[in-house]
Image (tube, helix red, strand yellow):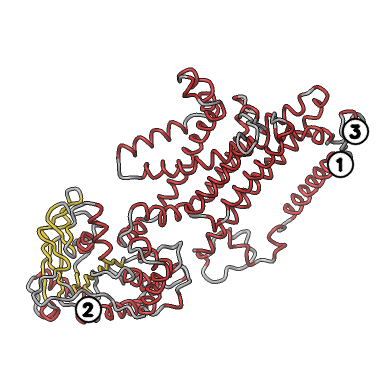
Amino acid sequence: MSHPITVPPVRADGMTAAVQMSGVNKWYGRFHVLQNVDLTVKSGERIVICGPSGSGKSTMIRCINALEEHQQGTIVVNGVELSGATKSIEKVRREVGMVFQSFNLFPHMTVLENCMLAPVRTRRLTKDQARERAMHYLERVKIPNQAGKYPGQLSGGQQQRVAIARALCMSPKVMLFDEPTSALDPEMIKEVLDTMVTLAEEGMTMLCVTHEMSFARRVADRIIFMDAGAIVEDQPPEAFFSNPLHARTRDFLGQLMH
Amino acid sequence: MNKVDPLPLSGDATHRTPSSVGEGLPRQNRALRGPCDWVLSTFSTLVLAFVLWRVLSWAVVHGVLGTTPQSCTDATGACWSVIRARWRIILFGLYPMEEQWRSATASVIAVCTLALACMPRMWSAARMVPVWLGGYLLFLLFIHGGVFGLDVVTSSHWGGLTLTLFIYITVIAFGLPIAIGLALLRQGRYPVFRHLTAFIVDVTRSLPLLTILFSATVIIPLMLPHALQGDKLVRSLVGFTFFFACYQSEIVRGGLQAVGRGQVEASQALGMSYWHTTSLITLPQAFRVAMPATINQFVITFKETSLVIIVGLFDLMASAQAAYHSGQWSAYHTEVYVFVALIYFIGSFSLSKYGKYVEKRFQTLR
């Protein structure tokens, strides 16, 4: 009955790169949003990405599941290159869960239906299998009793936990979080962060765009600081907070403390 | 608004919307607040009562329900005899007398199909398609015949309420899918189709339905070889369906635009294909938004079916005119029109009521 959150084995040789971006460039018109982004995320790694608004954090992780198209460079996710072909894109997306700032639950479906939809349609699970799996993950995010409700009847924190459960129902190999707590009232941030901490402790590969530095300190293997479309700093948390290499990182951290 | 509000503003006044101002007041105070309200209310009640009394006196008290025109010679009220004598023409037009049970059955099938399609539990492609296909084929089987020992009755003999219902379900059943297709193309990622559909829709919407019906029945035959023409009914139906589809497609497009970009992204992020995203996420939400406008369009279309009279199709309106046109009944056209109006009213009013029900249902789902 139990479904452990599927985690691909981390090989000792470190050859299983969950995400590999090399030389990625992207422009919005003449605005250079991503500048020569190189990033390798190994299976099981937890990456936290921070930076001022407009620095390209969201754009970068949205490139990983092709919600944004990159114009130069290569992105390989779980061994599949994002080439622009619909089939490869859908294949990548099924293995990459995403949690949005504004939850984006489907308002015309119940919580349970939200969680069952994609597994039934894209993973070819039977309804019973999908329901069992959905209930399992709803229990993991501690809201199985809300399964029959509609998203509009839940609080923001509950909605975001449903969104996490919905993504997990696809048994993704990588989870992307795009400012998952930014739209939440302060008292609801903790319940969502707790869910994410549990997920991290179970070994899920995660890329989180967030400004929750306590969360970053607690779970991140590496913290990435972006500015003006480029990765400026890429360090483990202790070094990132105590000894940032770049002045811009120091400024940013200084602003966060106030 | 503060002037009308006799209560002192309590709490935060900025949160009061005009519509909520009266809600705290006792019920009678809302309708009748001053001498002016009293006068207006009394006056309009009297007018209404007078009209109602006149109508009842004409229709019921002095109404006559005989079988011949002579039964009405002394009548001071309505002569319902004309309906009693001519209802078959009104409902079935020129359909052969002894086969009219088939026309009646076909009408019942059409109404049942519509009613079935209106049930929320039927709202999935897997159920809608068989309902419409089954209903449509059964309808044709009964009205056209040619199988199971039923004599063939060609479309030139179809008429009355049955023809009106046939036109309506055809326009809706074919027009709605076309409308969805046009809306999706106009919203889609291919610029060629975007511009093409925009052009087609905008041109069609700039033409009156009458022009389109005329072109379909008069001009097309001049241009196409006989084999490609189809009969007049089919040509009119094609034109009408397309006209409806163009209007409805703009309604659907409006609904699609109201669905947030985040919904599509969330669906895509789950690895769902374009078709799954469209059919399960965007379209269902678009229709919730577009429901009032859609019902509106459905009501308009039901009444617009009466325009086919202009190209010589024998629909409910045309057969109603035929019903009183035979010399002896010609004095009683009012009764016939009242009867026909009642039929249109029942159809349109049920649609409106149904729209209310659906909107309410959607609201509770939010």
* Label 2, label 3: how far apart the Cα atoms are: 92 Å
Q: How far apart are marks 1 and 3 (CA)?
A: 12 Å
First reached walking from the N terminus: tag 1 or tag 3: 1
Residue located beneath label 1 in the image:
B57
Question: Disc 2 or disc 1, which is closer to the eye?
Answer: 2
Q: Residues within 10 Å of mark 1 (few under 14, many from 20)?
A: some
Where is residue B226? Give x, y as percent.
Answer: 49, 20
The quarter holding residue B300 reads top right
Name the residue at the right extreme.
B74
Q: Residue at x 12, y 67 (%)?
A: A40
Chain ID for label 1? B
**Residue identified by numbered label 3:** B75
Q: In this view, does B348 lie to the left or right of B28?
A: left
Give residue B73's quadrant in the image: top right
- The image shows residue A240 at horizontal and vertical percentages of 12, 77
Q: Mark 2 lies on which chain?
A: A
Q: Quadrant of the N terminus of chain B?
A: bottom right
Which residue occupies 44% across, 68% down? A151
Q: What is the secondary structure assignment of the residue under circle 2?
A: loop
**Residue occupied by mark 2:** A203
- Give coordinates of residue B347: x percent, y percent: 65, 44
Q: Are marks 1 and 3 on the same chain?
A: yes
